[in-house]
Image (spheres, rainbow, N blue to C red):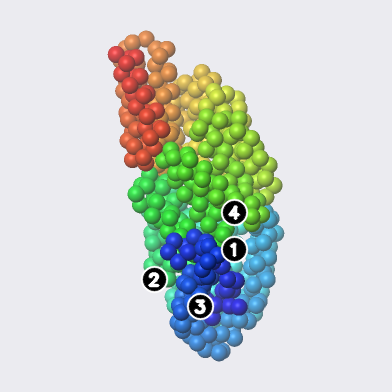
């Protein structure tokens, strides 16, 4: 069965709580599409969020337009679905060939009449091509294909086309986010929501809310981040998007981890992991192991964290290489905490190799900071501080929150450690003043996030500076 409005398949019946969107008990029955009690008087499509009684797409475009749309869709669907499957299985080169063949077939059969459905189909394949380059780590090329897809759909008013355009704006926003251009990312997300207008209870709307939640979380603006992240999960649950629910739970886990609420973080990560296991989503399982490993690291269980990360690396190594920089960076972070510089540098090199020539600014900043920590433990304090300065420049250019505050704390702590070996004098006092400034900025940042653990660590370090360097 298809939604007659957006042409998406209708899911089988499920049970949801009418108020919160959580799965309902056995005593009451609810409509799978809208969550209303059955028999539903107002039914919705889980994909597009529209009530079924609105004017159907077929009625909008007429029999001729609908016939053209069906013909175009039948032509492109095998190429698009096979390309997406190959990408999911970790074969980007083969997926690239499949999408390219899809574009060639569309152009050969339908380029003459220039129908809206032809442009819509091209946009869908262009989006697939973008995902190929994103998986390869070439974010600039991915953004280029997304802009082509956006241009194909600009000016098309029918709702299915606007749905796809909203999704493309979400993907463009993510590309800008990875570049560190938070302003353009936010504008793309807001444009996507404006395109959906009041029909945002669908996968496209959930993704846009997710993007805004992650963006404000990265900026350290938790007050704005949490409502967006919760709205994302609420929509995912309501429309029965289990994979999306796993991702939404992961994002909430990151939010709570950055606040220092590790119990809440672990609960959300575990919920995401259980969904991934149920769906046999190996990529999600690898990410879940990484996040659960990070929680172990923050709690000082380095052995448990390492075991989880090694298991995640084994899963991700063959097909989901984009996850590897994060995993290796976590391993390097553990080695840094254990003051093992050779091991830190080994994992930093692995992370850089996994990124290839295409590396995002956040990844570059994390890897540079970790190298700086290793250089310090190798007694190259001058080289370490130069790398810390470079890291700080990257963070300040992209305005990232939590990771930036961690770097400021680490930089300040290493300056204090360095000063313990210096004789009193103006140079030492200047360095200590710099340490106080860095740790003070970190303190303000962690306090803004509500992270009690790191706020206390910062304040203890400031107290130690006052006590030990009078």
Disc 3/disc 2 C-alpha distance (Å): 24 Å
Q: Report the residue marked by disc 2.
A: 198
Q: Are marks 1 and 2 in contact (CB under 8 Å)?
A: no
Disc 3/disc 1 C-alpha distance (Å): 38 Å
Residue at 35% over, 19% down? 464
Disc 3/disc 4 C-alpha distance (Å): 29 Å
Badge 1 local density, few (<14 within 10 Å), some, or many (20+)? many
- Which callout, 2 or 4, points to the residue nearer the camera? 4
Disc 1/disc 4 C-alpha distance (Å): 25 Å
Q: Report the residue marked by disc 3.
A: 39
- Which callout, 1 or 2, points to the residue nearer the camera? 2
Total numbered badges shown on the rendered structure: 4
- Which callout, 3 or 4, points to the residue nearer the camera? 3
Residue 320 at x, y percent in the picture? 64, 49
Judged from the image, the secondary structure of the residue bearing numbered disc 3 is: loop
Judged from the image, the secondary structure of the residue bearing numbered disc 1 is: helix
Residue placed furthest toward the bottom: 63
- Which callout, 3 or 2, points to the residue nearer the camera? 3
Q: Report the residue marked by disc 1.
A: 128
Q: Out of 209 and 412, give the one closest to the viewer.
A: 209
Examine the rendering and report whether any part of residue 359 can be seen: no
Q: Report the residue marked by disc 4.
A: 275
Residue 227 figure quarter:
bottom left
Residue 144 at x, y percent in the picture? 52, 60
Judged from the image, the secondary structure of the residue bearing numbered disc 4 is: helix
Residue at 40% over, 32% down? 454
């Amino acid at each position: 069965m298809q939604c007659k409005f957006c042409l998406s398949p209708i899911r089988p019946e499920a049970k949801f709580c009418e108020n919160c969107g959580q799965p309902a008990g056995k005593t009451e029955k609810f409509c799978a599409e809208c969550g209303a009690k059955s028999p539903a008087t107002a039914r919705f499509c889980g994909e597009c969020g529209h009530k079924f009684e609105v004017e159907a797409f077929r009625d909008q475009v007429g029999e001729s337009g609908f016939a053209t749309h069906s013909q175009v869709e039948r032509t492109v669907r095998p190429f698009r679905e096979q390309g997406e499957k190959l990408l999911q299985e970790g074969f980007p080169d083969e997926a690239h060939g499949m999408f390219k063949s899809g574009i060639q077939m569309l152009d050969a059969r339908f380029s003459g009449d220039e129908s809206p459905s032809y442009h819509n189909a091209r946009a869908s394949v262009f989006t697939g091509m973008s995902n190929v380059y994103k998986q390869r780590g070439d974010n600039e090329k991915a953004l280029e294909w997304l802009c082509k897809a956006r241009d194909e759909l600009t000016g098309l008013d029918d709702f299915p086309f606007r749905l796809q355009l909203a999704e493309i704006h979400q993907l463009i926003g993510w590309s800008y986010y990875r570049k560190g251009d938070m302003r353009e990312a936010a504008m793309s997300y807001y444009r996507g929501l404006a395109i959906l207008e009041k029909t945002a209870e669908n996968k496209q709307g959930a993704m846009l809310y997710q993007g805004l939640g992650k963006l404000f979380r990265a900026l350290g603006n938790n007050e704005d981040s949490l409502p967006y992240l919760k709205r994302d999960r609420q929509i995912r649950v309501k429309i029965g998007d289990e994979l999306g629910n796993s991702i939404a739970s992961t994002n909430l886990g990151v939010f709570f981890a950055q606040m220092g609420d590790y119990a809440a973080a672990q609960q959300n990560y575990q919920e995401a992991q259980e969904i991934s296991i149920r769906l046999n989503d190996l990529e999600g399982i690898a990410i879940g192991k990484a996040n659960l490993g990070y929680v172990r690291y923050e709690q000082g269980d380095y052995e448990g964290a390492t075991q989880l990360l090694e298991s995640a690396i084994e899963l991700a190594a063959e097909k989901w290489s984009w996850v590897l920089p994060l995993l290796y960076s976590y391993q390097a972070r553990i080695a840094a905490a254990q003051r093992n510089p050779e091991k830190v540098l080994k994992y930093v090199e692995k992370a850089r190799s996994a990124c290839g020539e295409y590396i995002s600014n956040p990844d570059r900043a994390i890897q540079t900071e970790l190298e700086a920590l290793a250089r310090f433990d190798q007694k190259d304090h001058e080289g370490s501080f130069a790398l810390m300065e470079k890291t700080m420049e990257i963070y300040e250019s992209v305005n990232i929150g939590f990771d930036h505050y961690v770097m400021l704390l680490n930089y300040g702590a290493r300056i204090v450690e360095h000063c313990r070996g210096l004789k009193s004098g103006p140079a030492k006092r200047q360095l200590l003043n710099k340490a106080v400034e860095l740790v003070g900025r970190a303190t303000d940042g962690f306090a803004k996030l509500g992270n009690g653990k790191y706020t206390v660590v910062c304040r203890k370090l400031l107290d130690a500076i006052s006590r030990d360097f009078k």
